[in-house]
Amino acid sequence: MTESKTPLRFFSWSLTRYVVKDVLISFVVGTVIFLLILLMFQVLRLSEFVVVHQVPLKDIARLSAYLLLSFVPIALPVAFLFAVLMEVSRANSEGEMLALQVNGLSLGRIFFPLGVLSLFICGICLYTALFLVPKGNRKFELLITQLGNERVMAALKPGVFLQGFYGLVLFAEQIIPVRNEMQRVFIYDERDEKHPLAVTAQAGILRLLPEREILTLRLTNGSIHLEKKQRDPIQQKIDFELYDINLNTPSRAESWREYSPPSYNYPQLKARLLETKHDIPANRQLLIELHRRFSLSFSCIVFAALGFFIGTLSQRGIRSTAVILCVLVGVAYWLSFVAANALALAGWVLPWFGVWVPNLVFGLIAYACYRWRLKR
């Protein structure tokens, strides 16, 4: 008779389906909401590209897609916390948790399906952080550089000398950005140090030739003054009706710029760590970036435990405040994460410790909630 009363199997497919179904729905909805919220913080930056730089909407859509991809490692853990907290608090307030426990299911057994789901989401988040996000971030950097090369007129101001305009000193009394046109232009060209030029023109227009990948400044009705480094009373002046200056701009296909640490995928990051062994600050920054990706992904597991045990402590009606609790926990975690990363970057703590300590702290909070729940 004693043998017939064997304990229930730790894994139950019906329990898993019951626990996971509602959590997955809330998780998907929460992910979309948090991604859109994070994208809204970039609206002013994106609108500047449209209004000031006259960037086409298709390029804005590409920038938005790359930004959304970069937000995924942050949005997934917070969305999972929201889903777990929302559904567990609902089940607890409606008496479903109590009913499961009365039927002999411990908190560990009820949490087990969520723990497995958190491992699965952690894997997705980690793969995204190690491979997909760096790829998207790199494309974002290159697209920004390309748009900057193509929309240089937006950076010009009328009546102001601009130094460093593709190696030139440029002055224009009037600028018409929509037509990429300038009026009454003065240019000092010292790219050839032995033969610097001073150019004046009535008008100038920037022309991009995509097939040749050349950005040209076409000047009309002006003069070229040849400056001689040697002492010579005779100065040369050449009048022109049309004069083209080819600007030194990166290839449209490449629009090259240096990699930033978030743009390295996992193999590139490991290779860069070996290359920078003797450059302590650069190596520390790359090491923090590597641990950061693993730590943010692992936070899915920490948030699953934290959301579950906070939800089991909740009283009736707490579901209405689940969003507020989620935001408070998310903000507290992010602030501690940023602060710990700053300490690690400054060299005050070891890189791995600074990145992983927020997970340790919030994991201990989840364990404290679990112990408190057992005593109730």
Image (spheres, rainbow, N blue to C red):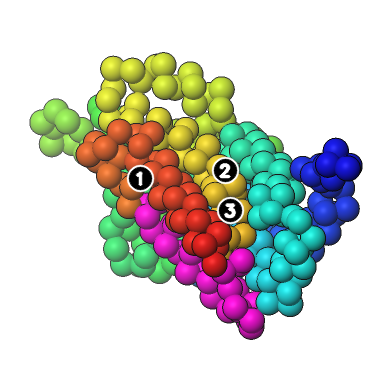
Q: Which residue is mark 3?
A: 305
Residue at (72, 61) in percent of width and height: 101
Q: Which residue is mark 1?
A: 341
Residue at (85, 38) in percent of width and height: 3
Q: Which residue is mark 2?
A: 297
Label 2 to label 3, Cα distance in Å?
Answer: 14 Å
Circle 3 or circle 1, nearest the eye: 3
Magenta stretch: residue 314 in it? yes
Give the amino acid type for the residue marked by disc 2 in the picture.
Ser
Q: Position of residue 89 (x, y in %)?
A: 65, 71
Q: Is residue 52 left or right of residue 311?
A: left
Residue at (79, 60) in percent of width and height: 103
Q: Earlier in the sequence, mark 1 or mark 2?
A: 2
Query: In the picture, which quadrant includes the C terminus?
Result: bottom right
Circle 2 or circle 3, nearest the eye: 3
- Asked if residue 67 shows in the view, the reply is no
- Asked if residue 317 shows in the view, the reply is yes
- Farthest front residue in view: 1
Give the amino acid type for the residue marked by disc 3 in the picture.
Ala
Q: Earlier in the sequence, mark 2 or mark 3?
A: 2
Q: Main secondary structure of the magenta part?
A: helix
Label 3 to label 1, Cα distance in Å?
Answer: 23 Å
- In terms of image quadrants, where is residue 98? bottom right
Give the magenta-colored segment's residue range: 311-338
Q: Nearer the viewer, residue 308 or 178?
A: 308
Q: Nearer the viewer, residue 257 or 112?
A: 112
Query: In the picture, which quadrant includes the N terminus?
Result: top right
